[in-house]
Amino acid sequence: MTTLTEATGEAAARETPARRRRRVDRLPYLLLLPCLAIIGVLLLWPLGQVVMMSFYKLDSVRQLRGDREWPWVGLANYAQILGDPFFRTVLRNTVLFAVANVVLTMILGTLVGLLLNRLGKKMATFVASCVMLAWATPALTGTIVWKWIFDDTSGLVTWLFNKLPDGLSTALFGRSDWTGYGWFNDPLLFFGILTLVVVWHSFPFIAVSVLAGLKSVPSELQEAARVDGAGPWRVFWSVTFPMLRPVFGILVVLSTIWDFKVFTQQFVLAGGTQDRSTFMLSIYSYAEAFSPPPKYGLGSAIAVILTLILLVVTGVYVRMVLRQEDES
């Protein structure tokens, strides 16, 4: 009779290398299943619910609870949003704000990353720790601090402007007393302050990421460029930037997604959803969905449009990066 050991050996001998590779190739997918399940529950299911709600007319909590039937309207919510001139204003605000913030965040973060790379180990650790405090601060907490800084009575900015000589303040700004001045009432000034808050909170991540990428650039290449007479600016664009292009590509995509979705900072600085002149897509979606009378279907349609815009922008940029890598 064939023993168990002999049978096992014969089965192993009959197993082809291709079958063995297929069995091994399945292992990574099996290990990913728990993560995919969590992503599906926490992300894909809510996203699917929002997409489904965008095709219905939902104007009451009772409908959401299932106490009343959801009236199907198809693409009517999207047609209403896209046909509204105010939507084009909101879209313009969102795009201009995102572009300005991405550019400023990338420039400031890159400069700080280059500075950290030039500092000594102890000083770089100290500066990086201080810089990362801004990134570690919750968006809500940091925005409340900035709102106090621009408070119209006891804020630091108001106090500093009141300390200016009356003649200079009047000549430059047309007023000498800044107490009670509404820093958040003018849309342009509001977006300026909002940009300051968002860039302050975002640039540390860019700086640390750029610093990590700089550590991977061979110092011999930079030294060779300096020996050939290249200055710091030329060394960066000819040596450093080409090697860090994938890093900058990822950072630009992430910054674009984050800046398109800014909500907390705007909501806190504006004090809610009263000032429609400063609306962007995220807060526009919230206002349509939850401001009385609530229109959950319209709010969901705006959220879906914002998601599609981000997917298109991200897809186009990733394709450009991949094409550049193939050409190089």
Image: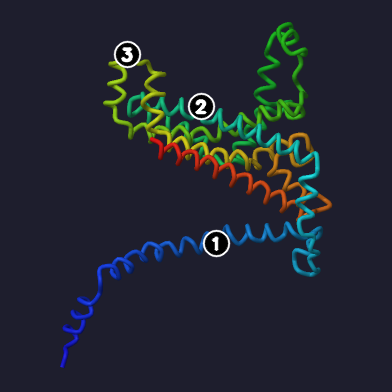
Label 1 sits on a secondary structure element that is: helix
Comparing 189 with 55, the one in front is: 55
Q: What kind of residue is marked 3?
A: Gly
Q: Quadrant of the N terminus?
A: bottom left
In the picture of the structure, the residue carrying the numbered disc 2 is: 108
Label 2 sits on a secondary structure element that is: helix
Spot occupied by residue 62 in the image (x, y as percentages of width and height): 79, 65
Q: What kind of residue is marked 1?
A: Gly
Q: In the rendering, which numbered label is found on residue 4?
A: none
Q: Quadrant of the C terminus?
A: top left
What is the residue that sits farthest to the front in this orientation?
327
Q: Upstream in the sequence, badge 2 or badge 1? A: 1
Q: In the rendering, which numbered label is found on residue 40?
A: 1
Applied colour scheme: rainbow
C-beta proximity under 8 Å, tags 1 and 3: no
Picture residue at 78% right of the left edge, 53% below the top? 77
Q: How many marks?
A: 3
Q: What kind of residue is marked 2?
A: Leu
C-beta proximity under 8 Å, tags 2 and 1: no
The residues bearing labels 2 and 1 have C-alpha atoms spaced at a distance of 36 Å
Q: Kindly indicate the quadrant of the structure image that contains residue 191.
A: top right
Q: Kindly indicate the quadrant of the structure image that contains residue 4.
A: bottom left
Q: Upstream in the sequence, badge 3 or badge 2? A: 2
Q: Residues within 10 Å of mark 1 (few under 14, many from 20)?
A: some
The residues bearing labels 3 and 2 have C-alpha atoms spaced at a distance of 26 Å
Label 3 sits on a secondary structure element that is: loop
The residues bearing labels 1 and 3 have C-alpha atoms spaced at a distance of 55 Å
In the picture of the structure, the residue carrying the numbered disc 3 is: 229
Spot occupied by residue 148 in the image (x, y as percentages of width and height): 67, 31
